[in-house]
Amino acid sequence: MAIRNIRKFGDKVLTKQSKPVTEVNQKLITLINDMLDTMYEEGGAGLAAPQVGILKRLAVVDTSPEGDSPIILINPEIIEVSGEQTGGEGCLSLPGKVGIVKRPNYVKVRAQDINMEYFTVEGTELTARAFCHEIDHLNGVLYTDLMTGELMDSDVEEEEEL
């Protein structure tokens, strides 16, 4: 597949609402595969379509230690949250930066798969944070809109970028 250019902080596409996906076709399958390749190439734990300039409600997440268990979320919505976690959060659209963000510690997401079938998926800790972060992107929200304190330089080896 192909590595796509990631839109950077300040690009207006990152602040826009994404439109629902209404059908899965070859173009969307290519986009999904390109997004996965791009996320893995850049060392991210998630990537939303607006980050590659496409205003569609599509995100990919993989927080597995080996990076071999991608979750494809088409038209995702958060349907349940609980608990709380506060920690450093990075983003492939803001490389080298981190901010402190409060997120739920548990998240349940309802989405569609590549067959447009509905499913639910649950995540805790980093996975919950990644679900929230990527779904925020689909709504034009960046973690910088939610963080407390100042944006800081990150040590790339210590921070997971979403």
Image: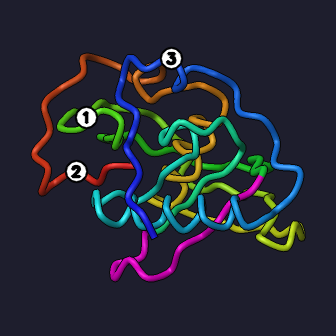
- Under mark 2, the amino acid is Glu
92 and 80: which is toward the camera: 92
61 and 159: which is toward the camera: 61
Q: Which badge, 1 or 3, is on the more N-terminal residue?
A: 3
Task: Name the residue tied to disc 1.
Answer: 98
Query: Are the residues flagged by discs 1 and 2 in contact, CB closer than 8 Å?
Result: yes
Task: Name the residue tied to disc 2.
Answer: 159
- Under mark 1, the amino acid is Val
**How would you rate the neighbour count of disc 1 (Cα within 10 Å): few for under 14, some for 14-19, many for 20 or more?**
many
Cα separation between marks 2 and 3: 25 Å
Q: Which badge, 2 or 3, is on the more N-terminal residue?
A: 3
Task: Name the residue tied to disc 3.
Answer: 12
Colour setup of the view: rainbow
Mark 1 or mark 3, whichever is nearer to me: 3
5 and 124: which is toward the camera: 5
- The residue depicted at 35 percent of the width and 66 percent of the height is 40
Mark 2 or mark 3, whichever is nearer to me: 3
User: Disc 2 on helix, strand or loop?
Assistant: loop
In-image side of 49 versus 155 (left or right): right
In-image side of 60 versus 5 (left or right): right
Which quadrant would residue 15 be assigned to in this image? top right
In the rendered image, residue 54 lying in the magenta stretch gets the answer no
Give, as a single range, the part of the protein colored magenta. 63-74
Q: Which badge, 1 or 2, is on the more N-terminal residue?
A: 1
Q: Which mark is residue 135?
A: none
- How many tags in the picture? 3
Q: Is residue 71 above or below residue 87?
A: below
User: Disc 3 on helix, strand or loop?
Assistant: helix
Residue 48 percent coordinates (x, y): 55, 47
Residue 22 percent coordinates (x, y): 89, 50
Cα separation between marks 1 and 2: 8 Å
- The residue depicted at 50 percent of the width and 17 percent of the height is 12
